[in-house]
Image: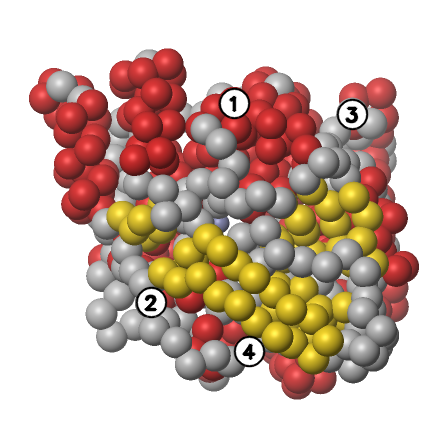
Amino acid sequence: MPFLFTQSQAILARTWIPCQDRPGVRFTYNAKVKVPEGMLALMSASNPTQKSATGDYEFTMPQPIPSYLLALGAGDLEFIALGERSGVYAEPEMVRNAAFEFGQTEKMIEKAEELYGPYYWGRYDMLVLPPSFPFGGMENPRLTFLTPTVIVGDLSLVSLIAHELAHSWSGNLVTNGTWNDFWLNEGFTVYFEMRIMERVYGPDFADMLVALSYDDLQKELAEMLENDPEATILKQNLAGKNPDDGVNAIAYDKGFHFLKLCEQTVGRETWDGFIKGYFEKYRFKTMVTEQFLQELAQLLTQDQWDAIGVDQWVYGKGLPVNCPFPASNRFFIVDEAVKMMLSTAPEAPDAKQMCYTEFETTKFWSTHEWLRYIRGLEAGGATVGHYALADENYGFSGSPNPEIVAAWFSAILRTSYEGYDPSIYAKTVTEFLTKVGRRKFIVPMYASMLEGDEKRQAWAKEIYSKARPSYHPLSQGTLDALFDSYE
Ligand SMILES: [Zn+2]
């Protein structure tokens, strides 16, 4: 059965519905949709849970939304309820695994409400999309769209649900007035996501996410400061650019760390009261950076404002030196394991044992620990020999977890290491890049290949020419530009 899904953010609603396509304009809507018999249609609105006999569906969205939250999906879909007001839609072969993976959703909604006030959208349902979906998730109201690549069986990637759920407040309820204010949507949402994760999974788990966010930020900042320093300013200037260019670690992670610093400066209780009041005061309205700063000025004393350096954070380039540095207990052990690997001489006869971290330790590792491990090897200048040892010990090349596969191959594709079996290595890379279209995974993998030797570059071009037609236009656009820059 075919599977149709839309993507309206940032300015793509106009490609399927004539509308005033900017985030500062809100509207309610009704819709009649006809799809082929046997398919279920869903929108960012009130939704059916059963297929209709004729393929006709009607939708109502009584809460006013901006155009970028208009959404439609249709396919051979089934529904499983997760709680009173939440559930998941997916294709029949996927829906049970999805319901298992997202089983904590109702608890997340409760914790989110405890933090920042009522959930105003009635239901919170999710739709699992095909692997070509270019993002992790899209916060379409009442119907979050999700990549299937977070369904890994161990619930380790559900921070994505916390993120999309948090958007029900930051973004969907209080919306960035223009795309230049995108950090108000994403920085707040990352902050709120971390708070939900802390409440549901504990501080040690949330600390890992914060540390990974900090690493992402440092990595992207280094590149951006070299190529386009203006783009590292929180309040963006997108004049003449596609707003999609602003989807980067600045809005998400620099925005998050700024809000984290505000929290640390005024104390959590005061800060939470402020945020809760802010969502309540501006619900179903739009917000721009300057208006938010006016609100913030009423909370902070002049001394606090200066100590934070609010103007520098919002209008300055790079990352201010008072950015909170994340500490993670669980990553401390991982970092030790990385050191042990990097201090091992790969040609030593007992190298494989010397660099091995006991299964008694690693069996408790989540996806995040493994990501930290792989990134640690990369940042620490691992050689081909080190990668081979890591692969032998932990089997990264054969991992069923897309997050680990993407991190691992992004690290090794630029090197001459070809896995413990070159034919399996070639098959894994080709199949992954042909099947998955999530931009966060495939862009660094291709970039890594393009940084490699001529053989790697030719291979990247060969795979891309085959895989490109199955990618979403947003992924195609990003990759076309990447390949052009290596011409
Ligand atoms: Zn988001």
Residue position for label 3: 364
Q: Distance between the residues labelled 3 and 2?
A: 45 Å
Question: Sequence order check: which comes first, mark 2 or mark 1?
Answer: 2
Q: Can residue 412 be seen in this view?
A: no
Report whether 273 appears left or right of 147. Answer: left
Task: Please give the residue where the numbered disc 2 appears in the rendered image.
Answer: 22
From the top left corner, tell me how far across and down residue 54 is, in percent. Answer: 81, 78
- Mark 2 close to ligand 1, CB under 8 Å: no
Left or right, residue 22 beside residue 37? left
Residue drawn at x 39%, y 39% is 188
Which amino acid, by three-letter code, is at mark 4?
A: Pro
Kindly identify the amino acid type of the residue bearing the numbered disc 1. Answer: Glu
Q: Which of marks 1 and 3 is nearer the N terminus?
A: 1
Residue flagged by tag 2: what amino acid is it?
Arg
Figure colour scheme:
secondary structure
Tell me if residue 201 can be seen. yes
State how far apart marks 1 and 4 are (Cα). 39 Å
Mark 3 or 2 closer to N-term? Answer: 2
Q: Front-most of 383 and 217?
A: 217
Badge 3 local density, few (<14 within 10 Å), some, or many (20+)?
Answer: few
